[in-house]
């Protein structure tokens, strides 16, 4: 239902953590080495195989293909246990579809990790794909505060706008089959989820009413939408944006949704006065989007999607709290679950801003 909502890294060289396993202890090591030999030029095997701690819904494995010219850094993105969970949310695309979207995005000039191979049944590893491992950082607290990224921060919002414009310009006729989601669809989907959780939040109900009254018309142009374009899914280096990650909830929808999701308060990580990911302004984001070939930004539609994105996050937090109360005692569930009250404050700032806080 909620897709990948964790803020962690799954590709960053420094921030990703995992446990390295020897070939004798890991049943995927031998077949993965064979995949490397077949699909990486000059590869003789693999080294450094470890599962990373990031990746909320898929397994993420880091490894190097060994060649006579040196190591080739790679990532395996794999279904849990190698088997697709047929009970997963209908909003998540199959891994094969995700790999196809990454290839299309790369061809359109979107920075992405090149896909080396989509796994087949003959590979004996399960469902997933192998791609390049991009150096950089995804952890917001580092990107927003470390001196290493000081020169990158002022230009990130504009870079994000330019990249979002490129992915929105991908010809819909070339896309694999994806779900179509309009603003009205999303509002009703999350309203039903909210009602099922059966824990009234008056501010949430006010937001649902506002969204129904302000939904964009059905005539709004639909494009490919990444669906989760925000801190945690962007690989950043000292030079700026290096790769867009995690395409699993991509769909066809209102392009303004991607411009708003990165602006909701949870992705600012304390930098509340820098609405774009905690590092930039909406003006820079929108200017980059239009300069990158995107259509003229509609601020009213962006606000609709920012309100909806904030409300969605609040409903996600409610879901986490509900899971915790029903017996899933993970720290993540408890930590995220308590944040629904913060979302109420964020919604009131959007719907009834005090003078000087717009």
Image: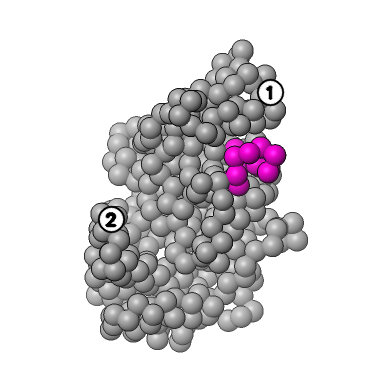
Q: Is residue 87 above or below residue 65?
A: below
Residue for point 39% across, 80% down:
196
The percent position of residue 198, horizontal first and vertical second, equals: 32, 81
Which residue is tagged 2?
Answer: 330
Please check the rendered image and state whether residue 109 is part of the magenta-colored stretch, yes or no.
Answer: no
On residue 342, which mark appears?
Answer: none
Q: Is residue 42 left or right of residue 225?
A: right
Spatial CA span between label 2 and label 1: 43 Å
Q: Is residue 272 above or below residue 319?
A: above
Of callouts 2 and 1, which one flags the residue occurring earlier in the amino acid sequence?
1
Which residue is tagged 1?
Answer: 41
Examine the rendering and report whether any part of residue 6 can be seen.
Answer: yes
The percent position of residue 19, horizontal first and vertical second, equals: 38, 32
| Nearer to me, 118 or 7 | 118
The percent position of residue 144, horizontal first and vertical second, equals: 32, 44
Tag 1 secondary structure? loop
Residue for point 45% across, 87% down:
213
Specify the farthest residue to the right.
173
Examine the rendering and report whether any part of residue 289 can be seen.
Answer: no
The crowding category of the residue bearing disc 2, from other C-alpha atoms within 10 Å (few below 14, some 14 to 19, many at least 20), is few
Q: Quadrant of the C terminus?
A: bottom left
Q: Is residue 347 left or right of residue 61?
A: left
Please check the rendered image and state whether residue 119 is part of the magenta-colored stretch, yes or no.
Answer: yes
Occupied quadrant, residue 52: top left
| Nearer to me, 212 or 19 | 19
Q: What range of the chain is rendered magenta?
A: 117-130
Check the image and tell me how it is coloured. one colour
């Amino acid at each position: 239902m909620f897709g990948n909502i964790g803020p962690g890294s799954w590709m960053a060289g420094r921030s990703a953590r995992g446990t390295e396993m020897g070939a004798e202890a890991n049943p995927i090591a031998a077949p993965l080495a064979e995949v490397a030999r077949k699909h990486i030029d000059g590869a003789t095997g693999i080294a450094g195989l470890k599962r990373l701690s990031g990746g909320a819904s898929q397994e993420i494995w880091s490894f190097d293909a060994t060649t006579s010219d040196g190591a080739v850094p790679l990532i395996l993105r794999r279904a849990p246990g190698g088997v697709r969970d047929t009970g997963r949310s209908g909003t998540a695309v199959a891994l094969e579809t995700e790999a196809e979207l990454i290839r299309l995005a790369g061809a359109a000039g979107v920075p992405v990790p090149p896909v080396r191979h989509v796994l087949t049944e003959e590979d004996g590893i399960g469902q997933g794909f192998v791609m390049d491992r991009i150096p950089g950082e995804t952890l917001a607290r580092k990107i927003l505060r470390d001196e290493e990224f000081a020169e990158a921060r002022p230009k990130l919002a504009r870079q994000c706008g330019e990249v979002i414009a490129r992915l929105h310009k991908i010809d819909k006729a070339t896309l694999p089959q994806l779900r179509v989601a309009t603003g009205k669809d999303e509002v009703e989907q999350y309203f039903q989820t909210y009602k099922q959780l059966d824990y009234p939040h008056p501010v949430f109900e006010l937001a649902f009413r506002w969204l129904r009254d302000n939904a964009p018309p059905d005539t709004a142009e639909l494009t490919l939408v990444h669906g989760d374009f925000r801190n945690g899914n962007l690989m950043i280096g000292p030079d700026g944006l290096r790769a867009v990650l995690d395409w699993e909830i991509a769909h066809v929808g209102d392009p303004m949704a991607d411009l708003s999701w990165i602006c909701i308060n949870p992705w600012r990580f304390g930098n509340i006065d820098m609405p774009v990911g905690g590092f930039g302004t909406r003006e820079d984001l929108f200017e980059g989007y239009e300069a990158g070939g995107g259509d003229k930004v509609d601020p009213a539609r962006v606000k609709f999607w920012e309100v909806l994105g904030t409300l969605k996050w609040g409903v996600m937090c409610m879901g986490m709290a509900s899971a915790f109360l029903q017996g899933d005692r993970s720290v993540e569930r408890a930590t995220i679950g308590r944040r629904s009250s913060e979302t109420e404050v964020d919604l009131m700032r959007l719907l009834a801003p005090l003078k000087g806080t717009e």
